[in-house]
Amino acid sequence: MKYRSTRGQVKAIPFSEAVMMGLADDGGLLLPESIPTLSAVELSQIADFSYPQLALNILSRFIDDIPQDDLKDLIDRSYATFEHPEVTPVIAKDDIYILELFHGPTLAFKDVALQLLGNIFEYLLAKKNRHMNIIGATSGDTGSAAIYGVRGKQGINIFILHPKGKVSPIQEMQMTTVTDANVFNIAVEGTFDDAQAIVKEIFGDLDYKQQHALGAVNSINWARVMAQVVYYFYACFRVQKETGCAQVEFSVPTGNFGDIFAGYIAMQMGLPIKKLILATNGNNILSRFVTKGDYSSAEVHHSLAPSMDIQVASNFERYLFYLYGEDSARVCEAMEIFKRDGVLPVSAAELQEAQQIFAASSVDDEATLATIGEFHQKTGYTLDPHTAIGVEAGKRVRSGSCPLICLATAHPAKFGDAVEKACGVSPALPAAFQGIDQLEKRLETMPADLTAIKEYVDRLALK
């Protein structure tokens, strides 16, 4: 399997090069040259696999330059860190299914990909006797999951930017209390979009990228999306077995379009998904696109679901590549227009095509709190704000003709204030969080300034 960029100038590179490159050198995002498909017979043959077995089967279709035995070891070690034997269990509640993605070390769905990505980085660096400086931006969960994926690993330094005061207290503590010598936290005085733009600008400086051997952990790295494809298969198979239904729908809380794009890839591989429901908070650029064809930037508003406080979804370019008929020149033109005018051109026919795959709804803070409270009262199950947005959006726009699976992206204790406000009780702190507020913290507060961030990385990077 070879990889190419959405912008057409990077072509035919192997997986090991694609994962180390992160953002493509032409500024685009990397994708496989073709999407492998599975027949109905092949799907039935893997339906009862354990999560690690399924991961090996799916991921080996995208990775052909890591020996199978080595890939199996990387997968097994990555998911051994999860506290639940199923890794991503599916729980039936009310008339929906909850896909719990928060059983990893940082209790968020990002662990599913980043535990694996950290091990892949370490494996490839050791093979080539190289080092890497990872730089990434986070709206909440990516930062801590990435840090936990590479903390203490040889040959890797990690620099994580987060918007100061705009992540939950637990999320901030998870990042800043990791004081391993290879971990550097930067609180940026701005929004997540500011931090993400700085990271993309840094990766766009090819001399700087090569000089510092930069690697990416944001979902601009294809391996992030690839790893997340697996749990769509896992959940679909479990719900099909329980219900006997041929198709399922997924509701996905998303801000950067990476998690739901993994569902799109699973769908293109042949998984029988009737519809992908895109759930946003009030920062609704993605839901506006699906419902109205309006992909235009707007001001970011802080919400109860901070991981979704995004108005420029970096992974959307990957879907745009397919929507535009794999026309890289048109993708380049569209991204230039968006950069200049803040609006992306989409035709009526393209909107109709997108609506065949996606439905969408935007859920504000008031509705989020109401959903957490009502769901808890009815089922005894506690949703975090992001998951609640997925549940509410799913209920609003589901077809009703097949089971609905809602992705639970974080443990409710990560957003205890919102949960307490909704339910009247604070969620119990998992053992991983107990006493975290007493730990030593280390972070640097910096302006949202490209030059200042580059100078900071330059001073502390592995060389």
Image: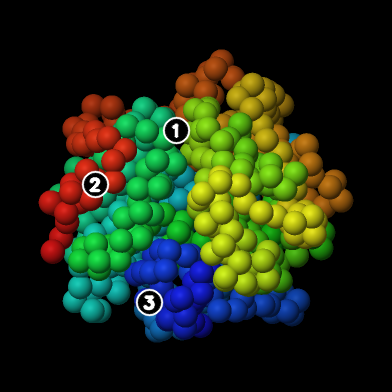
Which amino acid, by three-letter code, is at mark 3? Answer: Ser
| Distance (Cα) linking label 3 and label 2 | 30 Å
Q: Residues within 10 Å of mark 2 (few under 14, many from 20)?
A: few
- Tell me the amino acid under the disc marked 2: Thr
Can you identify the residue that label 2 sits on? 451
Name the mark nearer the viewer: 2 or 1. 2
- Asked if 400 appears above or below 327 in the picture, the reply is above
SS for dot 1 = helix
Mark sitting earlier along the chain (3/1): 3
Q: Secondary structure at mark 3?
A: helix
Residue holding disc 1? 414
Q: Secondary structure at mark 2?
A: helix
User: Is 360 or 394 nearer to us in this picture?
Assistant: 360
The reply, left or right, for residue 54 in relation to residue 196 is right
Please tell me which residue lies in front, 332 or 350.
332
Residue 332 against residue 87 in the figure, above or below:
below
User: Looking at the image, is mark 3 or mark 2 nearer the viewer?
Assistant: 2
Residue at 37% of width from left, 43% of height from top?
A: 195
